[in-house]
Image (cartoon, rainbow, N blue to C red):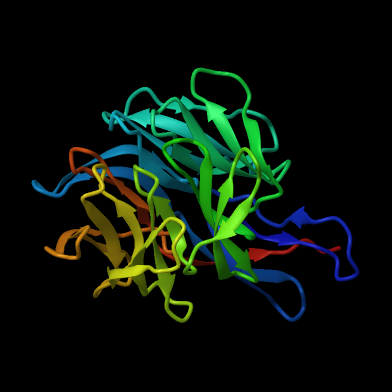
Amino acid sequence: MTLWKVPASGGSVEPVLASAGEDTDPEISRDGSKLIYTHVRQTFVLTVLDPVSRQSRELRKTREILAGPLFSSSGEKIAFFSHQSDGDVHLYTIGLDGKNLQRLTWAKGERNTFPRWSADGTFLYFNQSRPAPSLRKLLLSGGPSSELVSGWTWETHREAHIDSSNSLIVCTRMDNNLPVSTIIRDIQSGREVNLGRVLVSPRWSNDGKFVLGFQRVERSRAGQIYICPRGSDVCEKLTDGYNPSWSKDNSAVFFLRTGEFSDGAELWTISRTGRDERRVANLRPMYPITHRYDVSTRGEITYVRFDAGEHELWLTDLPRN
């Protein structure tokens, strides 16, 4: 992240700085000769945590945004997306030992985010915001991606999740950054129906009979977690929390609570029947914009640790026009 300028009357934008870090909070002196700003060098670390031993290992460390890690169904790989220095965003997979890093998308000018594994692990679904906003599918054995739904963006259709039969999509429809409905779309026919409750971060159960999600409370991270039978307007509240996900056998639900942390979250679990609620681990520090995690079949947790670095105040001379 760096600082740019544009003429007040409109026109081309130009970079003001080219520094090895993130530059924000600009203020120009009254005579226009100097610029003061905040400089920080933040780091993103793809991490795997064993909640039993409390030991963690770093799989990848980068200065560029890295987010959305998800285990494959076999638990042998993790998919994620990462920003590039030229502004593009691409998909990757990596082994649990931090080796065999593979970049999956390469086209110049693309922005591809939030990969989701198919149930059999043969391809990924993902969002593309550039060049053509869409929900797409990428075969891992090779070849170009294909479009599933045209025009879907993160701003309009969020957290799309495909069922194990690869025939139905559940996602949250957004309006002005607020959830307005949760829809189920038939991929083949394009027909859409509304779920009985508006849920954020919806997730199919493995058998495709239930949708898990949470209802946000007053624009905060706090929420109430629900399980909704497909085709029914009656949803069951499970507990309080946000960003829920099924255990791999669907017998339990993992979810987050902010707890006492301002720089992360607590990971909790509860049985499908609403019993045996317990805290699993503390995930911190996490990237403040999005709290994403996943739990493997072996119970390991992956998330992106966010090291903010020291904030510094910098001053520079501005060129005279």
Image position of 194 with respect to 159: above or below: below
| Outermost residue to the left | 53
Left-right relation of 305 to 193:
left
Image position of 288 with respect to 163: above or below: below
Image position of 64 with respect to 91: above or below: below
Left-right relation of 188 to 245:
right
x, y percentage for residue 162? 48, 43
User: What residue appears at the point 33 percent right and 25 percent down from the top-left corner?
Assistant: 99
**Which picture quadrant has residue 187?**
top right
Which of the image's four quarters has the C terminus?
bottom right
Q: Is residue 315 visible?
A: no
Seen from the viewer's position, the closer of residues 17 and 211 is 211
| Number of disc labels | 0
x, y percentage for residue 159? 50, 54
Q: Is residue 99 visible?
A: yes
x, y percentage for residue 316? 63, 64
User: What residue appears at the point 45 percent right and 67 percent down from the top-left corner?
Assistant: 233
Image position of 108 with respect to 115: above or below: above
User: What residue appears at the point 34 percent right and 42 percent down from the top-left corner?
Assistant: 206
**Which picture quadrant has residue 62?**
top left
Which of the image's four quarters has the N terminus?
bottom right
Seen from the viewer's position, the closer of residues 117 and 250 is 250
